Amino acid sequence: MGIGQIGGSLGWALRKNGLAGEVVGAGRTIRNLKTALSMGLICSYEPTPEQAVRGSDLVVFATPVSTIPGLIRSLAHAIDHGAVVTDVGSVKGDVVKAASVLRSQEISFIGGHPIAGTERSGASSADPGLFKGKTVILTPASGMTSAMRKVKRMWESLGARVVLMEPLRHDRVMALMSHTPHLLSYAFTDTIARGLARDKDLLQFAGGSFRDFTRIACSSPEMWEGIFIMNWKEIERTIKELMKSLDALAKAISRGDRAVVMRLLGRVRRLTEQVR
């Protein structure tokens, strides 16, 4: 369900590695579905979500995360009993709550989130090796050991490292490590956009640091609007911590305290070197 970069890459990787007998796609636009079919990301596509999920052993929701809870509720009646359902959404709390409707249909749900992808979107941005060496977070569910094994095995077969995590902790971690950085990039880029109204030549001075900081602001607005709203509680908590760090650095700079500034910059540099 959803043949963007993540969904398309997953379908392509499953086919390439012989892990699925048939991969059926569904999405909003025929043009994107035709692109996915021509690239070999899927075997076929169906005109409606209901037709796409029928007969499936495994259903993967890879649409923007804000749409996943509603899709789960509306398609619960169409998914076969005994099937396994998972997702790739960047927010887990609301998705896991919505998935409770599947239990009455004897359908297992395992929340998932591959920490992979770029700012590009659509089927044309798919890459069958996208998940190799990447981390995939799965949210455990009681009484669904068999389903968990199936979803875990799928991701590991694609070269990913699987980590199990409670939904609440997932959303807190993602607010800190992904959602807030994206929010800052969007906000900073908007500041530049407003600055262009006063100084139309600003962009000629854009260097590597500007491009690095604003790159993720090229991401899908539809996807990130949903993430920001769905996980705002945890993002807001992270922003408050960020403001403490910004305030401490600003005060040290304003009073000319070189030792404090250097200590903070050095500490941060050592941390960033760990993820290079």
Image (cartoon, helix red, strand yellow):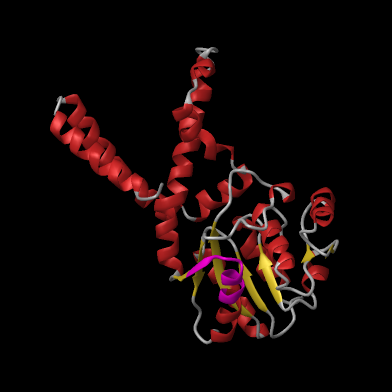
Above/below status of 194 relative to 198? below
Q: Residue at x 49, y 84 (%)?
A: 142
Question: x, y (%) of residue 155?
Answer: 58, 69
In percent of width and height, residue 187 lies at 47, 34
Between 158 and 86, the residue placed more toward the observer is 158
Does residue 238 appear left or right of residue 191 in this picture? left
The N terminus is located in which quarter?
Answer: bottom right
Instruction: For residue 1, say whether it is visible.
Output: no
Q: Is residue 74 left or right of residue 143?
A: right
The correct choice, above or below, for 265 with respect to 147 in the image is above
How far from the left and from the top, in percent, is residue 97?
54, 71
| Residue 19 in sight here | yes
Count every numbered label the image shows and give the total. 0
Q: What range is drawn magenta here?
A: 152-162
Residue 16 magenta-highlighted: no
Residue depicted at 19% across the width and 25% down the height: 254
Residue at image position (44%, 56%) is 174
